[in-house]
């Protein structure tokens, strides 16, 4: 599975170094954080690497154009970013034109992989679901009229919609029944936690049914020959890879590792800079560096054994080094977990064994007197474990 950067605020040299050093396979660009003239320059800077470059239109954020305190950044400077009247969306009359406008911008930027716009699905059984399916039904046909480049349909869906069980699986059935489907899907699962600071280890995405549904979506779509890019999936990246995902995209801040649609509403400024963290594959957790030093003194196995470990052992990393470490760890973790669904039963069983090993490490740390983060991490591991069992039931994997 490929590892992409989810681009956002404050990239500095993070993405460029990740691509240049072979840690990243590509980048999902954000028009929210980049004005049109700067985006052209950014694409030119990255194009020479030969990496995958795509552009998330973030059309789902048009919900907030009329909000009293929008937080849309540069989105409103892009010509395609407009919200038609709701009856026009429901009727579908404007959908082909909206897709065409968003793809035209991307083609003119020189991109060779396209991401079509779509609305956000808050509930699986809703008018928004019907509108979203209409966008996806039209995506490939419109794209073929404009270019020969592959096109990804956006499937942006709230975690509550995944909890709808049969209704969510009906959505997937509808996608697999599209006569002329897109080449792939850009799949985003949304949290309810607005602009999480990362303080809470177990988010509302760490729910067995949410995890199982996220895995199942990748499994079903990949079985139908779709290349699935998962946005903002962070710690679940290895699991979606096991289920057939083509790529996982993650950024360097909590808001780029977990998606929340309310990010497009302005919050009161303030707060401290987040702590430097380390993604520990053995612990299956993103731990504070200050805790890492203490943990590794008791249980050296918490370290990944990768090149970036030396930076953490020598001094406090920079923000760029922190991002590179997380991407390097995710790449190693997805390789270890296995990708594609040919050996899925074996890979899922092996992953559950690793979950048990991570539990034992956390129990050892608790026995050594560390208590603050142990229970939330154990709860999250339990959710992943139960999510795998539930997914295996839905997918009829023995």
Image (spheres, helix red, strand yellow):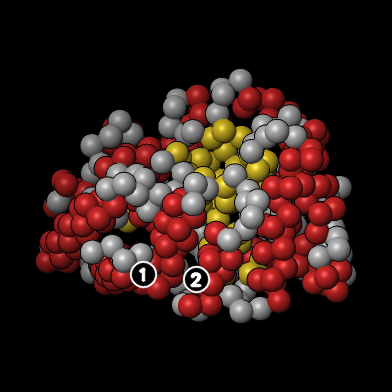
Q: How far from the left and from the top, in percent, is residue 249?
A: 51, 46
Above or below, 122 relative to 241: below
Residue pictured at 53% horizontal, 52% vertical: 231
Residue 169's disc is: 2
Q: Which of the two residues, 245 or 372, is positioned nearer the viewer here?
A: 245
Residue under label 1, please give it.
394
The quadrant of the image that shows the N terminus is: top left
Residue 238's disc is: none
Q: Which of the two residues, 70 or 331, is positioned nearer the viewer here?
A: 331
Q: Would residue 210 be visible to someone looking at this image? A: yes
Residue occupying the far top of the picture: 48
Horizontal side of 119 relative to 77 (left or right) equals left
Q: Which of the two residues, 35 or 239, is positioned nearer the viewer here?
A: 239
Above or below, 391 relative to 138: below
Residue pictured at 14% horizontal, 52% vertical: 298
Residue pictured at 58% horizontal, 61% vertical: 177
Q: CA distance from mark 1 to mark 2?
A: 10 Å
Q: Which of the 4 image quadrants contains residue 335?
A: top left
Please, what secondary structure does the residue beneath circle 2 have? helix
Q: Residues within 10 Å of mark 2 (few under 14, many from 20)?
A: some
């Amino acid at each position: 599975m490929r590892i992409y950067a989810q681009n956002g605020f404050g990239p500095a040299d993070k993405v460029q170094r990740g691509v240049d050093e072979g840690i990243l396979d590509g980048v999902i660009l954000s028009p929210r954080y980049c004005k049109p003239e700067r985006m052209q320059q950014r694409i030119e800077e990255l194009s020479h690497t030969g990496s995958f470059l795509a552009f998330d239109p973030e059309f789902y954020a048009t919900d907030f154009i009329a909000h009293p305190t929008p937080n849309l950044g540069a989105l409103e400077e892009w010509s395609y970013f407009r919200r038609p009247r709701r009856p026009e969306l429901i009727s579908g009359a404007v959908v082909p034109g909206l897709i065409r406008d968003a793809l035209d911008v991307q083609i003119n930027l020189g991109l060779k992989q396209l991401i079509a716009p779509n609305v956000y699905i808050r509930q699986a059984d809703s008018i928004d679901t019907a509108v979203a399916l209409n966008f996806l039904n039209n995506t490939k046909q419109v794209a073929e009229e404009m270019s020969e480049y592959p096109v990804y349909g956006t499937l942006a869906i709230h975690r509550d919609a995944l909890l709808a069980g049969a209704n969510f699986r009906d959505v997937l059935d509808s996608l697999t029944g599209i006569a002329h489907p897109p080449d792939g899907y850009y799949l985003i699962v949304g949290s309810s936690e607005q602009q999480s600071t990362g303080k809470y280890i177990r988010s509302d995405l760490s729910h067995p049914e949410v995890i199982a549904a996220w895995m199942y979506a990748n499994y079903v779509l990949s079985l139908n020959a779709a290349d699935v890019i998962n946005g903002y999936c962070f710690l679940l990246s290895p699991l979606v890879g096991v289920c057939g995902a083509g790529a996982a995209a993650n950024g360097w801040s909590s808001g780029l590792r977990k998606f929340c649609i309310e990010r497009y509403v302005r919050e009161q400024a303030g707060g401290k800079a987040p702590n430097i963290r380390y993604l520990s594959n053995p612990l299956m957790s993103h731990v504070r560096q200050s805790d890492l030093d203490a943990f590794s003194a008791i249980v050296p196995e918490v370290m990944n054994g990768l090149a970036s470990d030396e930076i953490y052992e020598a001094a406090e990393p920079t923000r760029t080094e922190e991002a590179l470490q997380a991407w390097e760890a995710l790449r190693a973790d997805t390789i270890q977990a296995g990708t594609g669904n040919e050996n899925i039963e074996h890979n899922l069983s092996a992953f559950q064994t690793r979950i048990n090993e991570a539990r034992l490490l956390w129990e050892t740390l608790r026995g050594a007197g560390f208590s603050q983060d142990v229970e939330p991490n154990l709860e999250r591991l339990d959710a992943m474990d139960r999510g795998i069992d539930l997914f295996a039931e839905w997918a009829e994997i023995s």
